[in-house]
Amino acid sequence: MEDVKMKKIAYLAATAAALVAANAHAKTFNGPFIGAQGGWEENSVNNPSTGVGPTNLYGTGDTGTLGVFVGQDYRILKNFVIGGQAEVNFPINSHITDGTTTVDPKRSVDLSLRAGYVLRDKTLLYVRGGYSNVRASTIINAETPIYVSGSQNGWMLGGGIEQYVTKHITGRMEYRYTNLSEGAGKFDRHQLLLGVAYHF
């Protein structure tokens, strides 16, 4: 009788351990998160449409960028993840100028969705796509200088990898391309971002 009780206890303990392990497994890349990111950004323009209308400006500007983000992931099936993210980023000094006309991106607000595949429960490979809004100032050095601040709306695509380094903290690396062209001109952005996130 005692052996039967011990076997039942051992069975219940093993079942409980399996349930705990299953719950722990389900928690990776599943739930809300917050984080910060930074990296490299290049803005490129070719006669872009701005707050003062079309401008005769061609050039690129390389800079650093810093930002924060918040989002939610959903683990679906066994290894697939879908999620959404909202963020705001601030380029450090990204003005593009030819001496007469200057375009200076100030900040961007990005809303995106991502889909990914989990490897070994701690690594996520993903693609991202969504909407981007960049606030930029345009300065024209004429006899009477013109200064206008306006928004550029566009879309972005990218992809990256995210890795758990502790129970709740992940590190990520991501590349993005953003097209902010409006009208006939060109205004686009390339970014390489490194980020750290806390998963609740």
Image (spheres, rainbow, N blue to C red):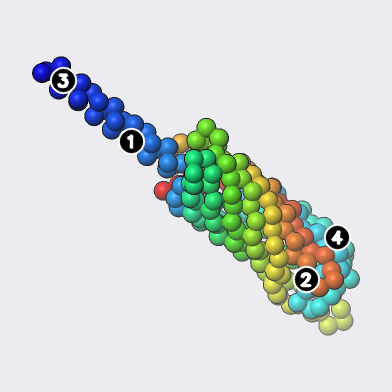
The spot of residue 127 in percent (x, y) is 64, 48
Q: Is residue 133 above or below residue 145?
A: above
Q: Which residue is mark 1?
A: 19
| Disc 1 to disc 2: CB gap under 8 Å | no
Q: Nearer the viewer, residue 11 or 98?
A: 11
Instruction: Tell me, for residue 57, which label it has, or none.
Output: none
In the foreground, 200 or 73: 73
* Residue position for label 3: 4
The structure residue drawn at horizontal position 69% and vertical position 47%, both measured from the top left corner, is 175
Label 4, secondary structure: give it.
strand
**Which residue in the rendered view is the most extreme toward the bottom?**
144
Marked residue nearer the N-terminal end (2 or 3): 3
The kind of residue tagged 3 is Val
Residue 167 x/y as whole percent: 43, 38
Q: At numbered mark 3, what does the secondary structure look like: helix, strand or loop? A: helix
Task: Answer above or below: position of 183 versus 44.
Answer: below
Amino acid type, residue under disc 1 in the picture: Leu
For discs 1 and 2, the disc positioned in front in the rendered view: 1
Cα separation, mark 1 vs mark 4, equals 58 Å
State the separation of the CA atoms marked 2 and 3. 75 Å
Q: Tell me if mark 4 has few (under 14), some (14-19) or many (20+) residues whose alpha carbon lies within 10 angstroms of its own.
A: some
Judging by the rendered image, the residue that carries numbered circle 4 is 59
Q: Closer to us: mark 2 or mark 4?
A: 2
The amino acid marked with disc number 2 is: Glu
Q: Which residue is mark 2?
A: 182
**Nearer mark to the viewer, of 1 and 4:** 1
Query: In the figure, is residue 186 to the left or right of 11?
Result: right
